[in-house]
Amino acid sequence: MRKIPAAADEARFWTLIESAWELVGDEPAALRKALIHRENDDAVPAVEAQVPHFLGHLRALSESLPSDELTALDRVLERKLYDLDRADIHGVTGGSDDGFLYCRGFIVAMGREFYDAALAAPAVAVRDTDGGKMCYFFAHLHSDRFGAFPKTESGISRESFSNPAGWN
């Protein structure tokens, strides 16, 4: 049986993302909004520079979670990356297998508002960004704590070009 993310797990996922960004400060929040509307040409490098701080806060907020909760969060992340695995989004972001995965990781790391905007209008996505550490964030955290990657049992892959519906 394929497991899909529960609504409560998805809500917790986005809450953790936003909570981690709040700890980074107010300026990155404004820059993330600017990305959606392309109001500031310097927003991409400025936000990318804050991603390591964001990930540090995300780790601090998540590292004490039990195995089942980290697995559920990884299942949500895996699904988000899979749903972004589309030709129209790749047309904007470009990238090889890994490069496209990292761009999708960046989209997810920017939060739900940016993620939803990129799904609805791929032109919102950003070319050549590096969200690579986000792509397996909860899997690595689970491995650090419990000695192995979680078994999401979703039957999908987060790897690039694996979503058949996105590549018709």
Image (spheres, rainbow, N blue to C red):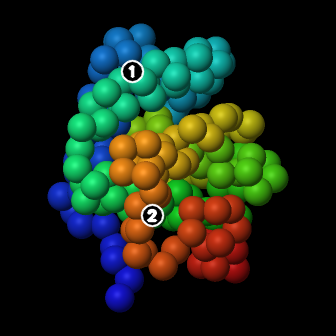
Which one is earlier in the sequence, the residue at label 2 or at label 1?
Answer: 1
Looking at this rendering, what residue extends furthest in the bottom direction? 1
- The residue lying toward the viewer, choosing from 150 and 159, is 150
The local secondary structure at tag 2 comes to: helix
**How far from the left and from the top, in percent, is residue 79?**
45, 63
Dot 2 amino acid type:
Arg
Query: Could you tell me which residue is drawn at 72 percent across and 38 percent down?
Result: 127
Task: Say above or below: 4 vs 78.
Answer: below
Locate the N terminus and report the quarter of the image it occupies: bottom left
- The residue lying toward the viewer, choosing from 113 and 107, is 107
Dot 1 amino acid type:
Ala
Residue ID for mark 1: 29
**How far from the left and from the top, in percent, is residue 112?**
37, 44
- The residue lying toward the viewer, choosing from 83 and 20, is 20
Q: Are marks 2 and 1 in contact (CB under 8 Å)?
A: no
- The residue lying toward the viewer, choosing from 104 and 65, is 65
Query: Could you tell me which residue is drawn at 23 percent across and 50 percent down?
Result: 66
Q: Is residue 80 left or right of residue 125?
A: left
Query: Could you tell me which residue is drawn at 40 percent across and 75 percent down?
Result: 153
Crowding around mark 1 (Cα neighbors within 10 Å: few <14, some 14 to 19, many 20+) is some
Task: Say above or below: 18 vs 6.
Answer: above
**Numbered label tally:** 2
Residue ID for mark 2: 79
Q: Is residue 24 left or right of residue 78?
A: left
Looking at this rendering, what residue extends furthest in the right direction? 96
Crowding around mark 2 (Cα neighbors within 10 Å: few <14, some 14 to 19, many 20+) is some
**How far from the left and from the top, in percent, is residue 48?**
59, 23
The local secondary structure at tag 1 comes to: helix
